[in-house]
Amino acid sequence: MIQHIKTHAIQHNIPIITDDVANILTHVIQTYQLKSVLEIGTATSYSAHVMAQAGAEVWSIERNKERFEIAQAFVEKSHLKHNIHLIYDDALTHACENKTFDLIFIDAAKSQYINFFNKYEQYLHPHGMIVVDNLYFHHLKPSLVKRHTRQLLKKLEKFKEFIQSHQEYESKIMPYGDGVCISVKNIDRFQDLESKIDIFIKNKREH
Ligand SMILES: C[S@@+](CC[C@H](N)C(=O)[O-])C[C@H]1O[C@@H](n2cnc3c(N)ncnc32)[C@H](O)[C@@H]1O
């Protein structure tokens, strides 16, 4: 099913996480026993399936009706259906159930990353982590793109400043996928996380 969702996404130009990011999410879920995930940006449920396959229970929010319905159809047929809960809503205004998550994965509108982070970090378990995808935005150069894209690049720069100066989180932006940021509060629990991920990805790429 996961491969089928991935192929469908590629054929229909639906953006999904890269293999490296899928491997990182799987690795952190399994290594740190992250049991519950809140995902912002389901698309058609590829990444939700990756994380459920790794052993987590996933709650995932999508505001695009067409994508949500495709995701629903995939999940209904999936052997992981009991571990994926799809929510059709705008994550910016969604009233989140009062529970905590071990992992919050933000993969939605880039212009809203600070808002997503600020709205949802209260739902993070103190020993959990927040992963944000697509921080590089293809390394586009502000001087070579149109105004709208330039605004998005500015917002991503603001997010990077915001996350790196955040008092409560230790964050690393890693060169996987299109730039992936991992933020944790409990540094002791995630000692050497960056180098562990580097070694893990290197091994994965070699095999
Ligand atoms: C990059 S795609 C997600 C890909 C997915 N995580 C995967 O790898 O399979 C981003 C998705 O976020 C959704 N999105 C953007 N802003 C959102 C919001 N405010 N609330 C909910 N979904 C949003 C878009 O409709 C889009 O489907």
Image: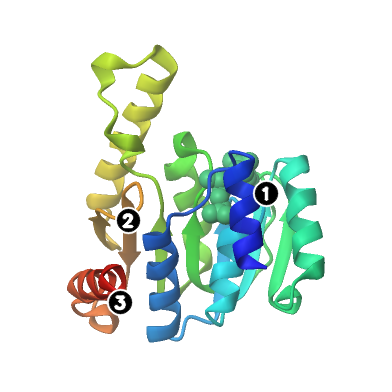
* Amino acid of disc 1: Glu
Q: Earlier in the sequence, mark 2 or mark 3?
A: 2
Q: Nearer the viewer, mark 2 or mark 3?
A: 2
Left or right relative to 135: residue 109: right
Instruction: Tell me how far mark 2 sits from mark 1, CA to CA.
Output: 21 Å
* Amino acid of disc 3: Asn
Coloration mode: rainbow
Mark 2: secondary structure = strand
Mark 2 CB lies closer than 8 A to ligand 1: no
Which residue was labeled with disc 1? 62
Which numbered disc covers residue 43? none
Find residue 158 and report its horizontal and vertical position in percent: 31, 36
Is disc 3 surrounded by few (<14), some (14 to 19) or many (20+) residues within 10 Å? some
Q: Residue at x 28, y 69 (%)?
A: 201
Q: Nearer the viewer, residue 154 or 27?
A: 27
Find residue 97 and report its horizontal and vertical position in percent: 69, 66
Q: Residue at x 39, y 13 (%)?
A: 147
Find residue 186 and report its horizontal and vertical position in percent: 30, 76
Which numbered disc covers residue 181? 2
* Amino acid of disc 2: Cys
Is disc 1 surrounded by few (<14), some (14 to 19) or many (20+) residues within 10 Å? many
Q: Is residue 167 above or below residue 141?
A: below
Mark 1 in CB contact with mark 3 (< 8 angstroms): no
Q: Is residue 148 above or below residue 70?
A: above
Left or right relative to 11: residue 107: left
Which residue was labeled with disc 3? 186
